[in-house]
Image (cartoon, helix red, strand yellow):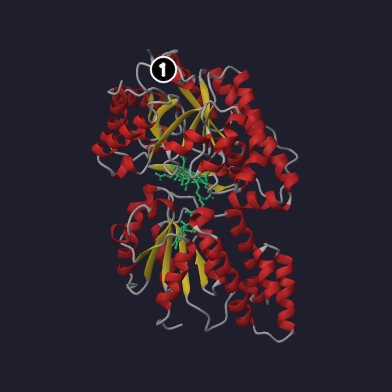
Amino acid sequence: MNSMERVMAAVAFGSLDRIPVIAQVFGHAAIVAGVPLDEYIQDGEILAWCQLKALDLYGYDAVFSVMDVNVETEAMGSILNYHKDQYPTVETYALSKENNWGSLSTPDPEQAGRMPEMLKALRILRRELRDEIPVVGCVMGPLTLTTQLLGMETALYLAIDDPDRFGRLMDFATEVVIRFGVAQIGAGAHLPIVFDPSASPAVVPHQFFREVELPRLKKLFESFKQAGAAVNWLNIAGPVESILPYYTDAGVNIANFDYCVTPHVASDKLPKTCLDGNIKPLAFVESAPDQITTEADMLLKSFAGRGGFILSSGCEIPPESLQENVAAMVMTARNTR
Amino acid sequence: MDALINALLVGNGADSIAHSQRLLHAGVSVERIVIEGIEEAMTSLDEKCTVSQFNLLEIMLVGRSVTDVMNYLYPGGSLPAGSKDTVVLATMEGDIHDLGKNILKTVLMGKGYRVVDCGKDCPLQKLVDVSEKESPLAVGISGLVTSIIPLVKQVRGSLRARGLEQVKVMAGGAALKQSSAERLHVDYLAETAFDGANYLDRISGGAIP
Ligand code: B12
């Protein structure tokens, strides 16, 4: 089985030669290749090259064209602060509550900000890996983009004070990420993973997720399917237990679960959906390889009877993670039949 | 006073100000409004917000009403002399997660502390400069990404190098919470914002106001 077949079989709860393993290696690929993080997240060619290098080193089952959570908001006018060895941060948000948003238009992924670089990386990765290894792009969820356009607190207060206006901005954010995601599929992504940290129950209650985010996620995932996405993958960090039951309705095929949710709870909430998770991200920085192996082993065992599982980290593998820890997770899956 | 507490707890800023106004007109002192109104509201929020039942939006809305009332009671933002100590807060350079820091700010203000907020993505240098200027009781650092841990470890040493060894350093936030006070070289590692506020109450007990 190649990686693509293995991942698709896991999604379908089919039979497998081994459990797929996908380390969520983004900026860590730059560190592995000895490239400064700020170059990695601004240059599609460097990004693709580092991803291929990390794939060679670790031998896991997918590569990512993921920069950081600010690509869309920057393309729409937010000013970022770049740091040499860290992810960029927003200095000035594109929108303010007082602005009139009448003139907003969706950015062109071939032109705006770093979007073209992400597409470039996808073209290279797909050319090199064809259909053997899943090539994964990335967009923000509608709520995350909205909070990244206004700032988290301004956005959340607006949701309470003027829900209609907030809803219109959410709809617009949905259009932006649909256009970006479809362009990624056009450039060679097998799918764009949807990152939606602001929709985490750490931030908004699950009722808010159900009423405000779910309908837009549904639209997003439908559009990706129509554009040819192989599967739909959602990553929301934190204590997601209360929102997992909505994922089926949203059209999610692979559901990421963070370290604070147990495999038992995740399987219980989503009995028919492929899950990926959930080794604690910080463990890749602070633990030793044998601890990672034990963790990974326990995860594989807890899903042995069920299937529909991809061994992974609970969220991004931190850039500064120890290589032997990432390798330990991958090897555990590769050595288990 | 109960009406004020209720208005604060449902996050209604306009009503909260109206009730404060009424109390002032009835001759209730500003101090009593803060202690028996705002601090009371914060305490009941503390009891409600256990770690598993944490509702950020609710806290944010209460926080906004508290800020409205504080601005009404102390126009211009300056607390009168003799109020509680100063606390300097920051999220360190490279980290933009500031929801937790802002909640801490609200909780501390609600308890009558004077808070100087260095914002997010704050360089160590700025934190030390501000601390030198404000001579706070404590510095509070919020950290959600692990990559800032090396910076956090330098805070106490940098303060000491400026002769600010009396300033306590407390830390909190998802990334730092997974570590320990010793490893981070800080005086206190808080589980929640309320936990941090209670720590300050304990150490400010004997301090000069
Ligand atoms: C919302 C969120 C975001 C928002 C933040 C918006 C904002 N303005 O804050 C956005 C979308 C912008 C974001 C961006 C990123 N995020 Co983020 N995010 C989250 C999420 C889902 C929730 C965090 C949160 O706000 N919680 C709610 C607040 C209220 O809780 P809190 O901060 O813990 O605060 C409470 C207490 O801890 C305490 N407290 C906090 N600080 C302090 C300080 C003191 C002194 C005291 C006394 C108390 C105290 O008070 C609060 C109330 O009790 C977490 C997941 C999680 N489970 O935490 C990831 C998470 C923090 N993010 C993470 C990451 C990796 C990122 C990015 C780097 C992603 C990327 N690849 O680009 C970027 C960050 C860029 C940067 N340089 O910082 C990781 C960090 C992991 C790591 N190894 O470091 C997390 C843990 C997700 C994960 N599991 O991997 N994120």
| Chain letter belonging to callout 1 | A
Q: Quadrant where the N terminus of chain A lies?
A: top left
Residue A63 lies in quadrant: top left
Left or right? Give the position of A100 relative to A269: right
Left or right? Give the position of A333 relative to B54: left
Work out which residue is located at the far bottom of the displayed protein and give it.
B27
The answer to which of A27 and A276 lies nearer the viewer is: A276
Could you say where residue B149 lies in the image, as x and y percent from the top left? 35, 52
Instruction: Answer few, some or many: residues within 10 Å of disc 1's Cα (few below 14, many 20 plus, some between 14 and 19).
Output: many
Q: Residue at x 58, y 17 (%)?
A: A228
Q: Residue at x 60, y 45 (%)?
A: A206
Could you say where residue A146 lies in the image, as x and y percent from the top left? 62, 42
Q: Residue at x 54, y 25 (%)?
A: A232
Q: Is residue B123 visible?
A: yes
Could you say where residue A289 lies in the image, as x and y percent from the top left? 25, 37
Left or right? Give the position of A70 relative to B10: left
Could you say where residue B183 lies in the image, as x and y percent from the top left? 29, 57
**Residue type at mark 1?**
Arg
Label tally: 1
- A246 up-or-down from A185: above or below: below
The answer to which of A104 and A133 lies nearer the viewer is: A133
Q: Which residue is mark 1?
A: A6
- B78 up-or-down from A24: above or below: below
The answer to which of A76 and A29 lies nearer the viewer is: A29
Residue B38 lies in quadrant: bottom right
Q: Is mark 1 within 8 Å of ligand 1?
A: no
Q: Quadrant where the C terminus of chain A lies?
A: top left
Secondary element under disc 1, as helix, strand or loop, is helix
Residue A331 lies in quadrant: top left
Q: Is residue A107 visible?
A: no
The answer to which of A241 and B13 lies nearer the viewer is: A241
